[in-house]
Amino acid sequence: MLRMKRRGGWAIPAFCRLSSDDLFLAESLIELFERHVGKSVGELEDSLRDFESQMESLGYHYKLVRGLVHILRATLKVSKPLTAVEPKRARRVVYEVASRRGYALDEVQRDAILKEAASKLGLSVEELWRAYEAAYEEAEVVEGFDSPEPVELLRRYNLSLAQTALFFAEWMEVEAPFRGYEAKELVRAVKGLGLMYTAVHKGSVLLLRLDGPASLLKSTRRYGARFAKLLPFVTSLREWRIRALINRGGRKLFTSLHSKLRHLFPEKPPAEDVFDSYLEADFARRFSAIASGVELLREPEPIVLGGQVFIPDFAIDVGGKRVYLEIVGFWTDAYLRRKLEKLSKAKVPIVVAVDRSLACSDFKELPHQVVVFSGRLRSYDVLAALKKMVELPKPKEVAPKSAVEAERYVHLVSKLGEQASLAKALAELGRAGLEEDQAMRVLEELGYEVVWKGIDPSKAIVRRKATSSSL
């Protein structure tokens, strides 16, 4: 729950200062959770309500208490209690008996229904009722929880408080030293999380400006979650400063944090992989499967463009030459303008992949190869763009596994005639179990070529090469 101290046009999260009173609260709460291991969730919830009331009477803010409870509750490990019969089955039989006899209006009728249902299942009434109630969440048994040190729990609370505040940010600026391993990890986190940013190199300082969740027209919750995941990478640095504009119910407030508060936050960023990197990994796998002699590199070195830092998504090395690949995903109008301006200044060879939902017509004017995609970036589209920029090695062969399969491919491709849309060709071969990249290679082997009409792949066609023999 968000607690903010407001003054003028500024708002600062009401952090725990790790005082002895704060530590007493955290320690007492952790002990309460430990005492309830092996007991039911319902018993734990009852005790938590009493605990909250007691702490409020001692002067603790209810939002602080509930915030700490929320953090610990999220780590609970629970299990269904052991019963003589499945809870769903017990409830079904009870409802069947009640439906036939009529719902109970008093204790006598209730006991009669339970006794008949228990008899049908070969159970005692007590065993039946235990199974009946086991379907409720309150009946689940607490097996354990992530039991942190009191100071670590308070630091997690502070981090959560700052993350919640930034979920309402229109933008955030991060200043950090432009040197060493830490800066590289910060940039890696920004790119890996797919955040919209501009990076400026000023002497020994790296200035990152990021568009916040409140600036987006859609997908705010998903983007906001990624935005929040960046914060622990910043707070774990030795030196940093954050400035943000928060929009709370139409009222805009500035907030500022700096590394003098570093002791209030967890010392290390999360160890688990927090990056939304599946799409990149999936593209890299498919691209490598069809592009022989081509090396795809994630997280290449930053490129400085007139003081701005450009960090491409990929670098593609082909025969000693390097081509960069930039994928444009989440967006706002201001972000697109900045992205277009930066890309227009780049003198290095770049393939720009643009989601169809963006203002694709603006990207057509870029002095680079532009590929339009919808949902999934096809590796063969990128490969086709590369062919216009560098000489590619002979592609890997996608040979049919048997003569029977070869005949099947020939039959399917022959349906296309002299010319067909690329979408239809991929659909025909997809019925044979081929992925898009495999289908494109089969088409090439069987004498077809792809003709691109602009940057939109939906308008592309496949046609038989003039020099190819008949199928």
Image: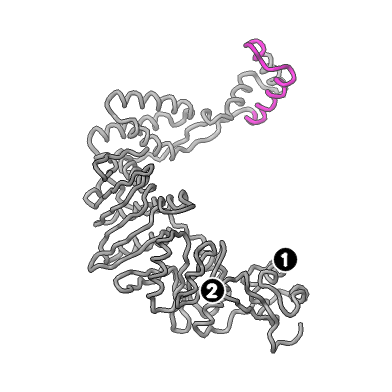
Q: Residue at position x 47%, y 30% from top? A: 38
Q: Which mark is residue 324?
A: none
Where residue 78 appears, as percent x and y from the top left, is: 50, 36
Where residue 225 appears, as percent x and y from the top left, is: 43, 50
Number of callouts in the render? Answer: 2
Q: Which of marks 1 and 2 is in front?
A: 2
Q: Which SS type dominates the magenta stretch? A: helix
Q: Answer with the quarter of the image where residue 275 lies.
A: bottom left
Q: State the SS at label 1.
A: loop
The quadrant of the picture occupied by the N terminus is top left
Q: Which of 227 and 34 is in front in this view?
A: 227
Q: Residue 382 carries which label?
A: 2
Q: Residue at position x 53%, y 83% from top? A: 392
Tell which circle, 1 or 2, labels the residue nearer the N-terminal end.
2
Residues in magenta, as a range: 85-111
Q: Residue furthest bottom?
A: 467
- Amino acid at circle 1: Arg
Q: Nearer the viewer, residue 373 or 128?
A: 373
- Amino acid at circle 2: Val
The quadrant of the picture occupied by the C terminus is bottom right
With respect to residue 74, does 116 lie above or below? Answer: above
Within-10-Å neighbours for mark 2: few <14, some 14–19, many 20+: some
Q: Residue at position x 42%, y 38% from top? A: 145
Marks 1 and 2 in Cβ contact (< 8 Å): no
Q: Residue 431 carries which label?
A: 1
With respect to residue 321, does 17 lie above or below? Answer: above
